[in-house]
Each structure stands twice: as structure tokens, then as C-alpha cells.
Image (cartoon, helix red, strand yellow):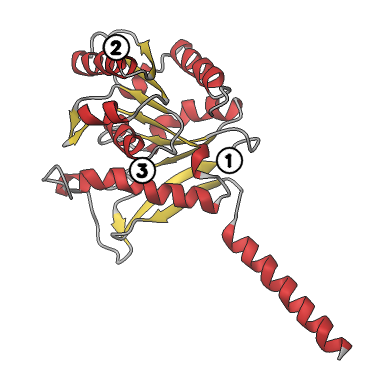
Amino acid sequence: MKNKISFLVFCVFIFLLSAGCTRINPGADDKAQFVTPDGIIISGKYVPPKTSDKLTFILLHGLASAKGEWEGFEKKLEARGYGYFAYDLRGHAGSCKTNNSQEISISQFTTAGPGSQWERMVTDINSAIKYLRYKGIAKNKVGLIGASLGANVALVYASKNEFIPIAVLLSPGWNYAGIETNEAIKNYGARPIALGASPGDAYAYSTATQMTMVANQLKGNAYFFEGAQARHGVQLFDAQGVFESKLLDWLDKTVKEPEL
């Protein structure tokens, strides 16, 4: 009888141990992947935060680009203790296959608006957050940083999901590939948001400055960072690192606020 009880205790221990390993895998992953509800295999790179109180940022790249555009900025985020999950948007770079081996590409994304492949880039963030939860990151510890098209994707998602505590938009537009942001900036509310654009990048600059004004008029917490020349998206990150340093200093200061 005693041996049977000991065996049962051992089995329960092994079950709990294996269940825990299945639920949480906190380490970094250079070949992170998740599959969207419609079967797109999304490829990315994940680095955890240094401490549990630090945020993890989902990094969303621009049109016809890839997660690699964040490489320099990733290192600076990591140096400040933040985690990050950069992935190739559907139809880009390493995210061009389905789980039944079909090829997809943005060249096939010929329609925009509701139900389109472009709009699904927004809902793909749900799957990215599930991946981060598997890594032990609570959803209210996930911020969004997007560039160009990725900025619109980030804003629309954050406007519909209040658990996202903070967002950064580099060169957003009122409409990129049918992803419209006019209502999204109004619905974002009082959560902190940073926007960046360069004067020579007329459309993005006009959008970002107007968004900042709209957000603050609605009792928001928006801050605008001006880039140089006509730099767009991650090109706002200058060689001297001035733009990044200002943005990261703002993040450090802002995420220390009690509500975050």
C-alpha cells in the first residue's frame, strides 16, 4: 500500500512538472513562431525582460520590410531591461507560409478593408500576445511599437484593447493599406502614446502631429518626437542615436507612472 501511494505521489509530481513546462517557457527564442487562426505561420524573435516589472514590446515593422529593421533598436530596448517580440508581419519575409505549406505574399493582398489580409495583421497581435503569455508575460505588460504600416496596426489594435498600457507610433498615417486610424486615435483614450515623424515626410508628419493634438484634446497623454529631414519609420533612428535616446528616456519615465 505504501509503495502504491509513493508511486501515485511520484506520478502527480511528474504530471505537474511537465504541465508547468508546457505552459511557461520563459527563455529567449531567436526562432519564435506562432500560427494565426487562419493558418499563417508567423516567424519572429523574442527576448524576455530582465525583471518581471519591465514591459515587453511587440515590434511591428513597415510595409515590404521585415523584423530585422528593428535590430539596432532591439539592443537598446534590451539594454534598458525591456523585453521584445519582433516578428515578420503576414506576407512578409519569414511569414510567407501556411501550416499546409501554401505560399503567401503581400503581392497577393489586392484588397483592403474589413476581412482583408491587411486587417488581419491587426488581429494577428492576439496570437502574438498568446505566445507571450506562453512565455510567462501578462498581457497588461505588453506594449506596442510600430513603424509606418506597423504603426497603424499597433494603434488600431491598442484602441480596441485597453489592456495595452502604452504605444509608440513611428510615421503613422491616417490610412495605410486600408488600415484607418481616424477613429482609433480617438478611442485610444488617456493611455500614454508617443508619436514620431519628420517634417520632410509630409503625410506622416501631418498625421502624427494631428494625432498628438487630437489625443491631448481628449485628455490623452500623447507626446510628439520630431525626426530629421524626410526620415520615415525606423529611419527616424539616426546614426548618433539621439532620437532613440529621447524616445527611450520617455519610455523609462512614463512606465514608472503608478498606472503602468
Mark 1 or mark 2, which has the lower sequence index?
1
**Which residue is nearer to you in this view: 18 or 95?**
18
Q: How crowded is mark 3: few (under 14 residues within 10 Å), some or many (20 or more)?
A: many
- C-alpha gap between disc 2 and disc 3: 25 Å
At horizontal 58% and vertical 23% (from top left) the residue drawn is 256
Q: Which amino acid does label 2 sit on?
A: Ser
Residue extending furthest toward the left: 111
Q: Mark 2 points at which residue?
A: 198
At horizontal 62% and vertical 66% (from top left) the residue drawn is 19
- Rendered image: mark on residue 88: 3
Q: Residues within 10 Å of mark 2 (few under 14, many from 20)?
A: many
Q: In this view, does 183 lie to the left or right of 5?
A: left
Decide: marks 1, 3 in contact (CB < 8 A)?
A: no
Residue 122 x %, y % = 30, 43
Q: In this view, does 44 lie above or below 219?
A: below
**Which residue is nearer to you in this view: 224 or 146?**
224
